[in-house]
Image (tube, rainbow, N blue to C red):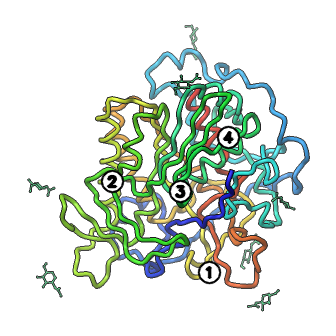
Amino acid sequence: MKKETRSDSNPLFAQKHNYHRFFLKLALSCLLVGLTVRLLFTDSFSLSSVVHNPPPLANAIPNSPFLSFPPPPSYSADFPVNQTQTSPQDAVECDLFVGDWVPDLNGPRYTNESCRVIQDHQNCMKNGRPDSGYLYWRWNPRGCELPKFSPRKFLDMMRDKSLAFIGDSISRNHVQSLLCLLSQVEEADAVYHDEEYKSRIWKFPSHNFTLSVLWSPFLVKADIFEDINGVSSSEPQLYLDVVDDKWTSQYKNFDYVVIAGGKWFLKTAIYHENNTVTGCYKCHGKNLTDQGFQHAYSKALQQAFDFMTDSEHKPVVFFRTTTPDHFEYGEWFNGGYCNRTLPFKEERINMRYEDSILRSIELEEFDRAKNASPNFKLLDTTGLSLLRPDGHPGPYRYFHPLLNSTVQNDCLHWCLPGPIDSWNDILLQMLII
Ligand SMILES: *[C@@H]1O[C@H](CO)[C@@H](O)[C@H](O)[C@H]1NC(C)=O
Ligand SMILES: *[C@@H]1O[C@H](CO)[C@@H](O)[C@H](O)[C@H]1NC(C)=O
Ligand SMILES: *[C@@H]1O[C@H](CO)[C@@H](O)[C@H](O)[C@H]1NC(C)=O
Ligand SMILES: *[C@@H]1O[C@H](CO)[C@@H](O)[C@H](O)[C@H]1NC(C)=O
Ligand SMILES: *[C@@H]1O[C@H](CO)[C@@H](O)[C@H](O)[C@H]1NC(C)=O
Ligand SMILES: *[C@@H]1O[C@H](CO)[C@@H](O)[C@H](O)[C@H]1NC(C)=O
Ligand SMILES: *[C@@H]1O[C@H](CO)[C@@H](O)[C@H](O)[C@H]1NC(C)=O
């Protein structure tokens, strides 16, 4: 298997001319009032009301837990039988997405040694991140137990099946977590990659299970002019009424889909509809109407959902909500960083303005689509992820970074192992329900 050394194109490390007006603080509660662009210039990210949990219980990584798995719990016991007989929306006994991070002595289920597919930029252990407390938490929904991911159970469910992750580098981050968790039972064979290792396919031969990740950061057709380091030479051209055939052409092959949009829509872009340029976002000096990213994101999600709703093929579709970032003391481009080492306790943390707008658009479009598509499920990881400012690579995006320098921090992607592993705990639980 080839090693991934490619750099990670993502919205935050791209587009050098895209710096202004990036993120701001706005309480979730002000979300609907906050659409005006006037508010765009605050760059503080106030977290002062936040209370920390008690310190995590361990500092060192124990030796053994990575390779031992308890027998799969009796899943049916977690959800009363009565509940499962009601309509699908009511089937969940508790809301898996409302809860707290609680200390977990067991620690991570894999390491940089046991999992070989962790991308360098997210390989915090290998890159020398000194603290390990962030590895000793588990997501604990209020009102029910969330069993830890059982690779055996997952692979049994996926026997003879095909699962695809569709989206941007966060989807790649997510799939790598899954590969690491599954590698405890079966190592995947890499059977395909595109030139930039952005779209990939793996097979799990003894389970005849196919896992893919498809690079489609906008979900609709887009011309992207970025080099391999994520530096763009021109703004993306988005065709908001044309769904991206990178994933639609494959769609009929999938039994399960985890699809997501998000941060790429915050980049400068030129918008096309109906074969004409209709506007843009943050395209100063271009004599085009700035339409804001909201319209583009709604439209793109509508296209994606409509495609799946209209398709005769009906895989189980998980729509994952946007992932929040945690830059503080600045932004990604001007020295912002994320040096917290503990989760937040309260849910009522201010989410950045853009993140809250992205999520509200997602919920709106998902709700609209869900009525016509009972096979759609919401993987609403935004809130639980917002509570984990401690789970990002920060400077440990690079191998033993010089901490005195103005090294660029990554406070968007997630360390592996790290909080993103819980997304897979939840994914499996949703598959079982
Ligand atoms: C579940 O169903 C049983 C039998 O139908 C009933 O006795 C029990 O009260 C129900 N439990 C709940 C929590 O609804
Ligand atoms: C894993 O990380 C540790 C530090 O936590 C480091 O000493 C070791 O060399 C790393 N191993 C690999 C294979 O990267
Ligand atoms: C593997 O799964 C595919 C469906 O995804 C099925 O068509 C094929 O027959 C399976 N192969 C074996 C060897 O079971
Ligand atoms: C797209 O173009 C067609 C034909 O020119 C026109 O009928 C239609 O109204 C246009 N749609 C939009 C959204 O502009
Ligand atoms: C801007 O666009 C408008 C309408 O398309 C056009 O009339 C005007 O001449 C353009 N201005 C410049 C400076 O190109
Ligand atoms: C993070 O950095 C700030 C400013 O450099 C410092 O005041 C704070 O103590 C640091 N926090 C941690 C947990 O290291
Ligand atoms: C950072 O540290 C390195 C070596 O430890 C040194 O060479 C470099 O000059 C330092 N940079 C700054 C800006 O202090």
Gap in Å between the C-alphas at discs 4 and 1? 38 Å
Q: Is residue 369 left or right of residue 98?
A: left
Can you tell which mark lies on residue 300? 2
Eyeballing the image, is 318 above or below 328? above
N-terminal of the two: label 2 or label 1?
A: 2
Which residue is identified by label 4?
188
The percent position of residue 58, horizontal first and vertical second, equals 87, 53
Gap in Å between the C-alphas at discs 2 and 4? 32 Å
Q: Is residue 130 left or right of residue 218?
A: right
Marks 2/1 in contact by CB < 8 Å: the verdict is: no
Q: Is residue 396 left or right of residue 367?
A: right
N-terminal of the two: label 4 or label 1?
A: 4
Which residue is identified by label 1?
335
Looking at this view, is 378 or 199 the one in front?
199
Residue most extreme to the right = 63
The residue under label 4 is which amino acid type? Ala
